[in-house]
Amino acid sequence: MQEEQRTFIAVKPDGVKRGLVGEIIKRFENRGFKLIALKMIDVTPEMAEKHYAEHKGKPFYERLIRYIQSGPIVAMVWKGYDVIAGTRQIMGATGPLDAQVGTIRADFALVKEYNIVHGSDCVESAEREINIYFDEKEIFDEYENMAEIVIEDLG
């Protein structure tokens, strides 16, 4: 059974610098997911450390921290039925060469380290990451998007 969820998505600095924000948003909206929060921010060292806490001590940790702070990101919260799995499907595998043709990473990423976009991998990660970048008052869930209207009409 499908479950309504929230997820955190970030267009990483390389995606912002390459002007891909609109294309990425369009792909999620076309799928019917609901954008409920969005902002462009510079990631602070504290945010970066919280975001990548599970990688602390790994050889690539410092590179991740530098990369996420190398320019602004576009932080977003999306909502929808099975939105975590759905957005991960749209993004594609972490490594662009492993990603299916037609996914964001297969279409736009050059190397695994600069793969355009981040998405939460589970409900717990989604809530943790949302709380790093957003206060609840910055999340707008009061409106119905077209997918919700259509699903409501089917019920």
Image (cartoon, rainbow, N blue to C red):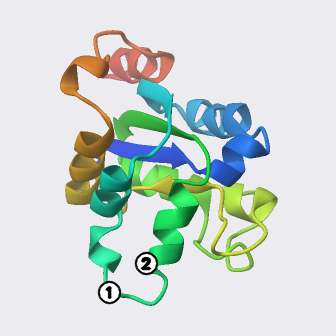
Mark 2–mark 1 Cα distance, whole angstroms, equals 7 Å
Residue 103 x, y percent position in the rendering: 69, 58
Q: Residue at x 78, y 57 (%)?
A: 108
Task: Report whether residue 105 is seen.
Answer: yes
Left or right, residue 80 beside residue 22: left
Instruction: Please tell me how crowded label 1 is: few (under 14), some (14-19), or many (20+) other residues with Cα within 10 Å.
Output: few
Residue 65 x, y percent position in the rendering: 46, 65
**Which residue, given by chain and number where applicable, does mark 2 sit on?**
61
Residue 49 position (above or below residue 73): below
Residue 28 x, y percent position in the rendering: 57, 38
Looking at the rendered structure, the kind of residue marked 2 is: Tyr
The residue sitting at the front extreme is 45
Residue 110 position by quadrant: bottom right
Judging depth in this view, the residue of 18 and 69 nearest the camera is: 69
Q: Residue at x 68, y 72 (%)?
A: 99
- Secondary structure under tag 1 reads loop
Task: Report whether residue 4 is seen.
Answer: no
**Which residue, given by chain and number where applicable, does mark 1 sit on?**
57
Residue 21 x, y percent position in the rendering: 67, 36
Q: Do residues under tags 2 and 1 come within 8 Å of each other at their CB atoms?
A: yes
Image quadrant for the C terminus?
A: top left
Q: Residue at x 39, y 47 (%)?
A: 44
Instruction: Please tell me how crowded label 2 is: few (under 14), some (14-19), or many (20+) other residues with Cα within 10 Å.
Output: some
